[in-house]
Image (cartoon, helix red, strand yellow):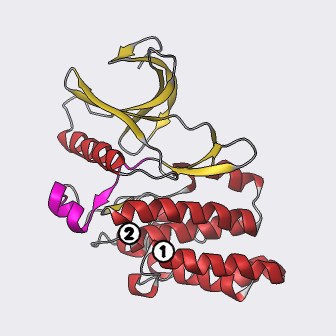
Amino acid sequence: MEPGRRIGEYEVIGPIGRGGMGGVYHVRDKANRDYALKAPIVDVEGNTEVTRRFAREANAIRMMEHQNLASAVDVFVEAGTLYLVMEKVEGRTLTAAIGMGLTPRQTLVFVRQILEGVSCAHGLGYVHRDLKPDNVLLADQGGWERVKIIDFGLVKLVGDAALAFGSSALTRTGTVNGTPSYIAPEQALGRMLDARADLYSIGVILFEALTGRLPFIDSDPHVVMRMHVKVPPPSIAQLLGSSCTPELVTLVERSLAKKPDDRFPDAVSMIASLDAAFTSLDHL
């Protein structure tokens, strides 16, 4: 999409990147306000499944309003193509922050905000399915940073949301979606999943932010997925040494449990464990 092109009421300024289901562009409206516009990536023959997934993402973002979720501003159709306009978040990615190094306290502050945003999504029946540091932006608030979760391109509907909007046609057992380094075991196996799959992905983010490395590493993504299913993660206590507490060990190990039933039942429970771990850092 070339700079200067007009899409609806918006002028394209330039590309930002690509999400799970579409290209993302910096656009500006007639009042000179900046936004992020997402357009579905459709092959030359017209990929109707991508279009349906994109429409579902647009609907999900419009339904969710939370300070830790990137919000939708506008959804419109032009020349048969659906476009989603979102707030443009100014700031770095969590990937960049991890690359610069985070203290345990900083890590827990960011992960808590991720959990708060995810709790809102889960409460409405949406499972993100692709949580990773690249999909977590840290919005510059002038001296501090606020988490903004982006890219619901692989969102799965569960519970009442699935009944209301339908998801069976787009999410079939045996289909693997997500990023191998952050994927939950049941997701890697192509099994039915629920919100606890997101909590596992957040556990991987937590592990990486605390240690500066992923729990499972291999050049072959299929090997990484098998490791998520079968291999215990490295000991967080050994990796962190004197910077670790029993409460932090409990938080990490339970979030990375192989079986969903052994994880936290929901984001609220994981937040409670995280707060206990944060408090425990005072006694180091």
- Which quadrant would the C terminus be assigned to in this image? bottom right
Nearer the camera: disc 2 or disc 1: 1
Mark 1: which amino acid? Val
Measured as percent of width and height from the top left, residue 81 is found at: 24, 27
Residue at x-position 69% and y-position 56%: 98
Which structural element holds mark 2? helix
**Can you say whether 25 is above or below 200 in the image?**
above
**Residue 212: x and y, percent?**
71, 63
Q: Secondary structure at mark 1?
A: helix
Q: Is residue 29 left or right of residue 84?
A: right
Which region shows up in magenta?
151-167
Against 107, residue 70 (above or below) is above
How many residues crowd mark 2 within 10 Å: few (<14), some (14–19), many (20+)? Answer: many
Q: Residue at x 41, y 71 (%)?
A: 197
Q: Which disc number belongs to residue 188?
A: 2
Which residue sits at x=55%, y=74%?
271
Q: Is residue 63 visible?
A: yes
Q: Is residue 161 magenta?
A: yes
Determine which quarter of the picture holds residue 266. Answer: bottom left
Q: Quickly name the residue at label 1.
A: 268
| Real-space Cα separation, disc 2 to disc 1, in angstroms | 25 Å
Q: Indicate left or right for 258 with 252 as reference.
A: left
